[in-house]
Image (cartoon, grey):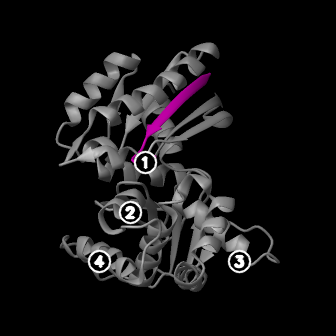
């Protein structure tokens, strides 16, 4: 059977069409639009312009699904709509304009779905999973490949840009503000597994981590492509790009435009969040997963009810 899954995030809206046979899938089509929905949040509420932006993209995706005769359509929203005061009203409006049913998932559930998506394609031992989105960052602790618990931090690549950065890219002072914000949000939980533990290995999920991996390849062009990030490389890339921002901002702009044009504003704050977390947990190796929350949603929410 064929399934369409739409992920409405704070920075991008993504749609993937899957062909599923014997509980295994292959991707038939993938689309994404950089909507920056988090930037439409004013005084804690999603503005009319943000709702219309989401509707425009979702109607485009709905038409694609209809043209491909995809009957099994699913849409879910993450931090873009769960962290706003008018969540129900905004979702109701979008559902009416697009004829799509939208499920708003919690931060903990988002983390768990990301873990399910990542773990379906590889075996995991002990460690921490990091999923940096536009409006939030999900952390998942797993032991012997089994999900233990999740924590959602209300800071992501786009919300960090919106709240802490004045220009296109962060200054040293703004970088330090983002680092402090990440650590302060971590300290708000009393769970020592998140506040005082170290994890040697981890998994990285989502567009920010994948973009950082592309940056690594740009820095070390003689390396073969590997879906792994060492913490020392993330630290070095962060420091070099911050220096570029001070000395040659145009060169930094060119680098990001070439590698991740969708992330001109968000790659640097996302990189700072990732570097802060890797230092905090003393992680030395982060494996980059090409599967995440959409695949987890497909397995957990969809296929479990069709098998």
Q: Is residue 276 above or below residue 138?
A: below
Q: Is residue 88 visible?
A: yes
Q: CA distance from mark 2 to mark 3?
A: 24 Å
Mark 2, mark 3: which one is toward the viewer? 2
Mark 2 residue element: helix
Callout 2–callout 4 Cβ contact below 8 Å = no
Residue underneath mark 4: 183
Residues 199 and 47: in front is 47
Tell me which label, 1 or 2, sits earlier in the chain: 1
- Per the image, the residue denoted by label 1 is 113
Badges 2 and 3: C-beta atoms under 8 Å apart?
Answer: no
In this image, 274 relative to 228: left or right? left
Q: Residues within 10 Å of mark 1 (few under 14, many from 20)?
A: many
Q: CA distance from mark 2 to mark 4?
A: 16 Å
What residue is pinned by disc 3?
219
Instruction: Determine the CA span between mark 1 and mark 2.
Output: 26 Å
Q: Position of residue 66 (x, y in %)?
A: 57, 14
* Residue at 49 percent of width and 69 percent of height: 268
Q: Where are the magenta residues, as a range?
A: 1-11
State yes or no: residue 193 in magenta: no
Q: Earlier in the sequence, mark 4 or mark 3?
A: 4
Considering only order in the chain, which callout, 3 or 1, is on the residue closer to the N terminus? Answer: 1
Q: Residues within 10 Å of mark 3 (few under 14, many from 20)?
A: some
Q: Earlier in the sequence, mark 4 or mark 1?
A: 1
Q: CA distance from mark 4 to mark 1?
A: 24 Å
Mark positioned earlier in the residue sequence (2 or 4): 2
């Amino acid at each position: 059977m064929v399934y369409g899954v739409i992920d409405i995030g704070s920075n991008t809206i993504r749609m993937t069409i899957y062909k599923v046979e014997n509980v295994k899938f292959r991707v038939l089509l993938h689309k994404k639009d950089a909507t920056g929905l988090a930037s439409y949040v004013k005084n804690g509420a999603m503005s009319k312009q943000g709702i219309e932006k989401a509707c425009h993209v979702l109607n485009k995706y709905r038409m694609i699904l209809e043209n491909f005769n995809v009957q099994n359509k699913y849409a879910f929203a993450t931090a873009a709509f769960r962290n706003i005061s008018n969540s129900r009203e905004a979702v109701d409006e979008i559902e009416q304009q697009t004829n799509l049913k939208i499920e708003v998932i919690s931060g903990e559930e988002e983390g768990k779905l990301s873990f399910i998506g990542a773990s379906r394609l590889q075996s995991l031992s002990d460690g921490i999973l990091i999923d940096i989105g536009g409006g939030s960052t999900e952390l998942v602790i797993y032991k012997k490949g089994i999900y233990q618990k999740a924590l959602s931090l209300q800071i992501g690549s786009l919300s960090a840009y919106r709240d802490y950065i004045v220009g296109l890219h962060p200054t040293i002072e703004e970088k330090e503000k983002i680092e402090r914000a990440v650590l302060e949000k971590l300290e708000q939980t009393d769970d020592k597994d998140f506040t005082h533990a170290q994890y040697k290995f981890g998994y990285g999920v989502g567009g920010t981590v994948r973009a950082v991996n592309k940056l690594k390849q740009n820095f070390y062009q003689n390396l073969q492509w590997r879906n792994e990030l060492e913490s020392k490389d993330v630290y070095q890339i962060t420091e070099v790009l911050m220096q570029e921002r001070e000395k040659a901002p145009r060169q930094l702009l060119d680098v990001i435009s070439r590698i991740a044009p969708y992330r001109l504003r968000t790659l640097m704050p996302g990189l700072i969040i990732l570097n802060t977390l890797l230092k905090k947990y003393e992680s030395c190796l982060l494996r980059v997963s090409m599967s995440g929350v959409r695949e987890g949603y497909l397995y957990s929410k969809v296929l479990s009810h069709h098998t």
